[in-house]
Each structure stands twice: as C-alpha cells, then as structure tokens.
Image (tube, grey):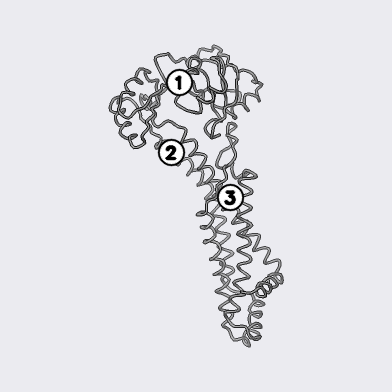
C-alpha cells in the first residue's frame, strides 16, 4: 500500500465526513467504556493482592451456634507447639459503632512494646513511639472524626457507658488503602477496656506459618486440637474477596451488554448492505480500470483508519481517565458509596491480554463488515451498477 492510496482513502472519508465522524465517535466511546472497566478491575485486583499479602496465614476463631465468641488466650502456647508454626498471637479487636455518622470503626489492639502479627504495625509503632493512651487512625476514620470536631482525641464509650479518652497520634499509612481506611490502632489494654474483654481472653488467634505448603496441614491439626474453633486460611479470605469482587464486576457487565448491543447493531447495519452512492463509486473505479483487489484494499484502508483510530483514541482515553483522573463515577460502582470508603489511587496496570482481546473483538469484526459488502458491490458489472 502506497501513500497515494492512503491519501485517496482519507479523501473518501472526508467526502462522508459526518458519517465517518459518527462512526469514529461511537467506536471510540465503546472502546473507552470497555477498556476503562477492565483497567479499573485490574487495578483493584492488584490493590486486593497487596492487602492479602499483609494478612496472617491462619485465623483461629471460637464459634458457638455459628457466632464468634472470645477465645482463651492460653491456647496460643499449645498452637505454637504444632510443627510448622513459627508464632501465634492473640488478637483483641472489634467493631465500634459511631452513632453520629452511622458507621463502624475497626478497633485493633496491639502491644506497643512487643512484636505484633503484622510488619506494618511494627513499623508504625517504631516510627511514632506511641504511648498507651494514643491511637493511630485510618484516612477514612480521620475524615469522619474531623467532621464531628474530634481533632486531638476521641472518647470511646464502653458497653457500661463509661468514657475511654484516647489521643490521636497519627494517620495510618499502609501499603493498601483498602486495608486501613476504617482502622483504629490502639494499645491492647485500651482495646480490652473499650470492649470489656478480660485479660485471659482474646477475640481470635492468628498463626504465622513460614512454609505455605504446610498451611493445610497446620490448619487441620488446629481444627483437630480444638473442635470448637473455625480455622480460616489466607486462601479462604482470598476466595471471599474474589466473590465480592465478582459481584461488583457483575454490575459492570450490565453496562457492557448495552455497549456491545450498540456495537453489534452498528456492525449489522454496516454489513447488511451499502448505500447506492457507494456502489456507484465502486462502479466508477472499476470503469476507470481499478481491479477488485485495489477496491478492497481501498475499503480496507478506509475501515482501518476509522476503527484503528477509534481504538487508539478509546484506549489512550481510558488509560488517562482511569489512572490520571482516577475514574470518577465508574470507580464508585466498585467501591460503593460508604462514607468510610477508602480514598486510594488506582495503581497503573497495563494488561496486554485485555487490550489485545478488545482489539481482536472489535477491529476484525468491523473490517469484515466493510470488506464483505464492498466485495459484493465490486463484482457487479459497472454498467449495471451505474444504471
């Protein structure tokens, strides 16, 4: 294909400028919508993986009648004796309902002077040098507290109606905003005071297992040792996250159905036949000595300029919209509309598999819808076509 052919194809598109622009705009919009959805999905999946990496390998929870109950803290020593277990930690945590805002805060208690079950907690304690009456909050919690004029401290109210004042020492900075937005980190003694939990009990126990291959065996041994507990592994949590994510993605599929429906209607309209003027153009070209292969090459160029240009514009626009503008409106469908929803930046992700899939679905289909009618028109006798 030479430059003269490309120039002639552009001239043909300019002759049908409004139709060409309409097709270019519609295809660009469809590619932008579909690609934006996949970019958001890929970025949130990456964010969830960061959250999972920071989680303990095994959770041990005591349940009675399917409800979570405090677990004896002394079970930690027996769990640590199991082969393959590096360490076990009793956790004190719970949900604190803040009535004015109608939200639940996740209050987590740890010992500020000892090693905890999460590395980012240890780094935070080392950097801030926290006192027993201080706390660190997530970004979402800070927004809510400031809205209700709690800037320097917050008064927790125990089930007995007593006040537990705790000073605000800093904002939680985790590798994943999804992990920390609703979190309040306090000293374990204050957490016990807030939830009225005795010192010999814990909310649950987390277990660290260095070898991932030993997780199923260790989990089975813990379950056999304590039949009244529920053992949850990181893989179980990952599956739960994936289920929630798939549910959110299903909402986007409803949008995709409409987009693809519009796409196929356009393709069908294009493939169902050509305008009379276009048939005459092909007949004139044949009368001037153009071969069928030359005509098909010209129509291929015209279609490629429209669909190829719209694909590039839609893809680049989707990347800019998602990772520069942070996907306003569309991101809310995945995140939800909670007042505590985390404010995090979508991690830039470029998935060649997704981009190429969209390309091979949209581009060849449109090219076929242009080439086939053009071929049918080009095999008609020029004299008959011009009548």
Quick one: which residue is furthest to the bottom in this view?
383
Q: Give x and y (percent) for residue 5.
A: 65, 75
Give the residue number, with chain letter if any, for mark 3: 36
* Image mark for residue 320: none
In the rendered image, which quarter is residue 32 located in?
Answer: bottom right
- Marks 2 and 1 sit apart, C-alpha to C-alpha, by 22 Å
Give the residue number, with chain letter if any, for mark 2: 238
- Marks 3 and 2 sit apart, C-alpha to C-alpha, by 24 Å
Q: Give x and y (percent) for residue 91.
A: 43, 22
Task: Please report the residue visible at 65 percent of the width from the left and 76 percent of the height from the top.
Answer: 278
Element class at badge 1: strand
Of 252 and 187, which appears nearest the observer? 187
Which corner quadrant holds the C terminus?
bottom right
Q: Residues within 10 Å of mark 1 (few under 14, many from 20)?
A: many
In the rendered image, which quarter is residue 277 located in?
Answer: bottom right
Element class at badge 3: helix
Total marks shown come to 3
Q: Give x and y (percent) for residue 353.
A: 50, 54
Query: Can residue 43 be seen by looking at this rendering?
Result: yes
Task: Please report the residue visible at 30 percent of the width from the left and 28 percent of the height from the top.
Answer: 83
In the rendered image, which quarter is residue 199 located in?
Answer: top left
- Marks 3 and 1 sit apart, C-alpha to C-alpha, by 41 Å
Specify whether 287 is left or right of 49.
right
Element class at badge 2: helix
Q: Are marks 2 and 1 in contact (CB under 8 Å)?
A: no
Task: Please report the residue visible at 52 percent of the width from the left and 19 percent of the height from the top.
Answer: 186
Give the residue number, with chain letter if any, for mark 1: 92
Which sits earlier in the primary sequence, circle 3 or circle 2?
Answer: 3
Query: Can residue 387 be seen by looking at this rendering?
Result: no
Of 187 and 150, which appears nearest the observer? 187
């Amino acid at each position: 294909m030479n430059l003269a052919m490309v120039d002639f194809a552009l001239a043909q598109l300019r002759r049908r400028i409004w139709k060409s622009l309409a097709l270019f705009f519609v295809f660009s919009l469809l590619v932008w919508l579909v690609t934006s959805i996949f970019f958001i999905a890929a970025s949130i999946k990456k964010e969830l993986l960061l959250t999972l990496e920071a989680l303990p390998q095994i959770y041990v929870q005591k349940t009675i009648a399917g409800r979570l109950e405090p677990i004896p803290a002394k079970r930690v020593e027996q769990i640590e004796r199991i082969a393959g277990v590096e360490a076990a930690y009793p956790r004190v945590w719970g949900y604190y309902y803040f009535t004015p805002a109608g939200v639940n805060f996740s209050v987590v208690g740890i010992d500020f002077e000892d090693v905890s079950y999460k590395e980012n907690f240890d780094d935070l304690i080392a950097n801030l040098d926290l006192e027993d009456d201080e706390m660190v909050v997530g970004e979402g919690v800070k927004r809510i507290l400031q809205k209700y004029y709690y800037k320097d401290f917050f008064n927790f109210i125990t089930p007995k109606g007593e006040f537990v004042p705790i000073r605000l020492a800093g904002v939680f900075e985790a590798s994943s905003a999804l992990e920390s937005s609703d979190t309040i980190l306090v000293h374990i003694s204050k957490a016990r005071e807030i939830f009225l939990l005795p010192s010999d009990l814990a909310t649950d126990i987390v277990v660290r297992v260095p070898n991932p291959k030993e997780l199923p065996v260790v989990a089975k041994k813990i379950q056999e040792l304590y039949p009244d507990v529920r053992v949850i592994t990181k893989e179980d949590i990952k599956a739960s996250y994936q289920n929630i994510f798939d549910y959110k993605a299903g909402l986007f599929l409803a949008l995709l159905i409409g987009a693809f429906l519009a796409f196929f209607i356009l393709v069908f309209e294009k493939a169902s036949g050509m305008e009379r003027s276009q048939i005459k153009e092909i007949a004139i070209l044949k009368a001037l000595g153009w071969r069928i292969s030359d005509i098909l090459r010209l129509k291929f160029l015209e279609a490629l300029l429209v669909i190829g240009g719209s694909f590039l514009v839609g893809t680049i626009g989707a990347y800019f919209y998602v990772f520069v503008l942070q996907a306003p409106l569309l991101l809310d469908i995945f995140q939800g509309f909670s007042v505590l929803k985390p404010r995090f930046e979508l991690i830039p992700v470029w998935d060649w598999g997704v981009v190429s899939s969209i390309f091979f679905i949209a581009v060849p289909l449109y090219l076929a819808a242009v080439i086939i009618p053009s071929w049918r028109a080009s095999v008609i006798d020029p004299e008959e076509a011009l009548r």
